[in-house]
Amino acid sequence: MNHLRWLNEFELGERWRATYSDGEWDSRLRNRLDAADIDYSYTVKADPRFLDWATATRRGAILWWKPAHCCTFVGWVNRDGRQYAAILDNNYPGRFELTPREQFVRLWAGYGGFALTVMEDPASSLPYRSYEVIDER
């Protein structure tokens, strides 16, 4: 599960993927997490406040995104005066996909509105570009 990797739970993520790589649906995922004694929080109502919380705590979430596909929501990103959902698709894990917030919430609701966050320690902050201006006069 890409979400576990996002939370720096690499071994658990690899074990989960090796055991359960056959697709998923929300109730079966919750049953499997319960059986593994993994704490989580979830919504089935496409409530953007859940994703606001997932962003604020840097935990992200898994959610149904795209037809019949689960992806990792890693947080809201502000760019050019707009807010975007940043998504990691497990088929393309090295690339963030950005979708404007309003469009994302509408489409996410159309895919069922499910999102789940494993309650592990949050991911580290993403690195940012910094620089120092040196006056060459």
Image (cartoon, grey):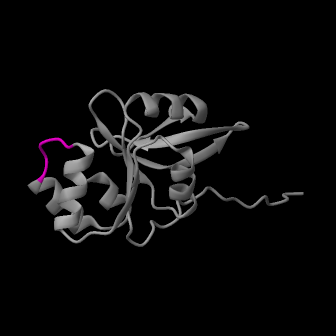
Does 72 appear in magenta?
A: no
Residue 113 as seen in the image, left or right of residue 56: left
State the image quarter where residue 94 is shown: top left
Residue 130 as seen in the image, left or right of residue 103: right
Q: How many marks?
A: 0
Does 21 appear in magenta?
A: yes
Residue 73 or 119: which is nearer the viewer? 119
Residue 87 as seen in the image, left or right of residue 36: right
Q: Position of residue 13 (x, y in %)?
A: 23, 61
Q: Position of residue 99 (x, y in %)?
A: 53, 32
Residue 14 against residue 65 in the figure, above or below: below
Magenta span main SS: loop
Q: Residue at x 22, y 72 (%)?
A: 37
Residue 25 against residue 33 in the figure, above or below: above
Residue 19 as seen in the image, left or right of residue 98: left
Q: Residue at x 59, y 57 (%)?
A: 128
Q: Residue at x 23, y 62 (%)?
A: 33
Q: Position of residue 115 (x, y in %)?
A: 39, 47
Q: Position of residue 90 (x, y in %)?
A: 29, 43
* Quadrant for the C terminus in the image: bottom right
Q: Residue at x 58, y 38 (%)?
A: 84
Q: Which residues are magenta?
A: 20-24
Residue 17 against residue 46 in the figure, above or below: below
Residue 47 or 16: which is nearer the viewer? 47
